[in-house]
Amino acid sequence: MGDGRRRHIDVAERRARLSLRHRLAGAARAATPEEVTASLVALHGTDPATVYLAVAARLADPAKAVPETERALYEDRTLVRMHGMRHTVFVFPTELTAVVHASTGLTVAARERASLLKDMAKAGAPDAAWLAEVETSTLAALARRGQATAAELTADEPRLREQFVYAAGKSYEGVHTVSSRLLRVLGVEGKVVRGRPLGSWTSSQFRWAQAPEHPELDAARAQADLLDRWLRACGPATEADLKWWTGWRVTEVRRALSAIGAQEVLLDEGTGYVADGDVDPVAAPGEPWAALLPGLDPTAMAWQRRDWYLGPDLRPHLFDRSGNVGPTVWWDGRVVGGWAQRADGEIVWRIAEPGVRREAEAAVAAEAERLRAWVGTTKVTPRFRTPWERELSA
C-alpha cells in the first residue's frame, strides 16, 4: 500500500524492473549492441573493455559482442563514445549526441576551457588567440585524416607539442602538453569523440574522430529529454539518484522532473520518481537469473542509493576507494558477490550470501562459462582494481 496518494514500489518490484529493462533476465536479452545501449541510455566508457563486457552480458548471443559493437561504433556509427554526465566518458546512441551535449556537456566544457586558458596564462604559455589557431588547425587535420591519434595530429600541427608547467610550486606540480589538454576540451565541447582503438577491444589507446553533426538544442529541453529516457530505464529513482547520475544542480533536476510530468511514488527510503505513465506494477520476469557484470557496469553504477540491490557489507569488497565498482555477480536483481579472470583465462567468482549460494551456484557457473567461451584467451583487467577482483584473480 502507498501513503494514500502515492503508490509504494517495493524492493521486489524495483528488482523486477531492473531485470527486464536492463536486459539481464534471460527472456529480456537483446539482439544487438544498439538495443542494449538504448535500454540503458548509456554505457560507461572510461574503461573500453567495460563496453564490450556490458553488452555481452545482455546479448542473447554474447559471441557477437565484439564484432557487432565495433560495427556500431566504428562502421555504422550508430553508437558514439564521448564525454557525458559528470565529465565521464560514455557510449551513447548517436541520436543522443545533441541531447547529451546540450544537457550536460556545455556547462562542463565552459569550465574546462576556462581552466585550460587560466593554467596556460599562469605558466606564461601562449594566449587564447594562439590556442584558437591551434584548435582550428587541429580540427582541420582531423577532418582530413578521418581518425587520428594525438601523435598523428601533433605531426600535422606541431604547436600541439607546446608544454607548460601546471601548479608551479605545489606538491602536485607537473608539466602539461597542449595536445592532451586541448583534445580533452574539444571532447567535452562535443567537437571530437573517441575513435577506433590502436589495439584490441581491451586497449585504452585510441584514435580521435570528428563528432557526429548535431543540432544545437535548448539546454532545459535537452535535460528534460535525457531525464525522461533515464527514468524509463532506471526509474523509480530518488532526487539524490538523479542529481548524482546527471551531475546537475538540484534546481535543474527539479525543473526537468516538472517538465516531463514525472510521477511521485513511495520508496522504502522516501519519495521517488517514475516517468509519466510508468506507475503501474511490473511483474517479476519469471525464472531467476544470474549475471556477471563488469567493473563500472551501468546497472551497478546507475543509482547513488544502492541498498535495494547491493548490501552494505559487500561494498568494501566490490568498490575501490574512489567509488568505482568492480566486477559483480548478480542473482535475480541483486548483487551477491564478485568475480575475476585469472591469467590463464579462467573465470572465478565468489558468492557472499550463504542463503543464496546453493540456489544460484549452477546458474552463476553457467554464466561464467558463457563469459569464458567468448572472451577466450583475451586477458581483461579492470582499469579500477577492487579488493575482491585482486584477490580472486591472483
Image (cartoon, rainbow, N blue to C red):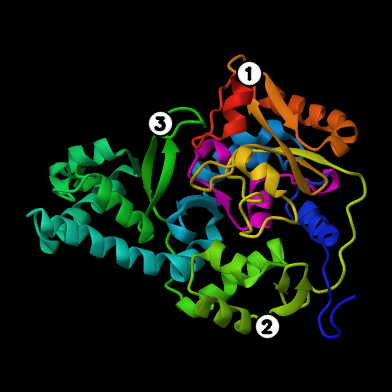
> Percent x, y for residue 277?
78, 77
Pick whichever, 77 or 49, lies toward us: 49
Position of 180 with respect to 359 (left or right) is left
At x 65%, y 60%, the residue is 305
The residue under label 1 is 345
Identify the mark at residue 261; answer none if there is no mark.
2
Numbered disc 3: secondary structure: loop
The correct choice, above or below, for 240 with respect to 152 in the image is below
Q: Which residues are magenta?
A: 26-51
Q: Residues within 10 Å of mark 3 (few under 14, many from 20)?
A: some
What residue type is disc 2 on? Gly
Pick whichever, 152 or 23, lies toward us: 23
Position of 110 with respect to 319 (left or right) is left
Instruction: Point out the frontmost of discs 3 and 2.
Output: 2
Numbered disc 1: secondary structure: loop
At x 72%, y 43%, the residue is 58
